[in-house]
Image: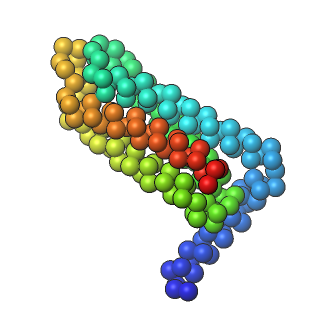
Amino acid sequence: MSTAAAVGLAVVEWIGQWPGARWLQQSGTAYLLVNAAHILGLGLLLGAILPLDLRLAVGRPQAALSMLAPVAIRTAAVGLALAVLTGAWLFSVNPADYLENNAFRWKLLLLALALVNVAAQHRQWRSLGLPDATRALPVRVRVLAGTSALLWISTLVAGRWIGFV
């Protein structure tokens, strides 16, 4: 076994033994609560960002975007933070099995792509400023928004797939 593989295995074993992981492994109630918090984070993220993405993707008039976008983006950010933190905690319960699960690996890839897309969207908003109601949305904004919706939904589906693989 290579040194890198040995270190990786030691890290995976350590993750599965940290006190938070042990608590979830031993308490069905604790696992239930952390899992519920993970689902809440997903609900906040998708419930906030999908309406905004879909509105942008179809190019609807932007009259309310100045009110909708900041609230949706902040709510989605809180949901993302909660989902990532609780997801990492749930991962710690059995990290070796998760790392071998193809659906989990797809979820991580899709999550990474969704986050790259978020960065691209924010670069677009900073360069354009929030569009006013009289201007049509640029195609690149609409494409990034549609891509965002597809990536977040795909990440959700991959997460649900984990338990079936």
Q: Position of residue 116 (x, y in %)?
A: 35, 48
> What's the image's color scheme?
rainbow
User: Which residue is depicted at the point 54% across and 31% down?
Assistant: 44
Which quadrant holds the N terminus? bottom right
User: Which residue is depicted at the point 58% across and 60% down?
Assistant: 101
> Looking at the image, is 53 positioned above or below residue 26?
above
Q: Would you say 155 lies left or right of 114 here?
A: right
User: Which residue is depicted at the point 53% across and 47% down?
Assistant: 158
Q: Would you say 74 lies left or right of 16 here?
A: left
Q: Would you say 140 lies left or right of 90 here?
A: left
As drawn, the residue found furthest toward the front would be: 165
Q: Is residue 75 visible?
A: no
Q: Would you say 70 lies left or right of 101 here?
A: left
User: Which residue is depicted at the point 25% across and 32% down?
Assistant: 141
Q: Quadrant of residue 128?
A: top left
Callout count? 0
Q: Position of residue 126 (x, y in %)?
A: 25, 35
> Looking at the image, is 132 positioned above or below residue 32?
above
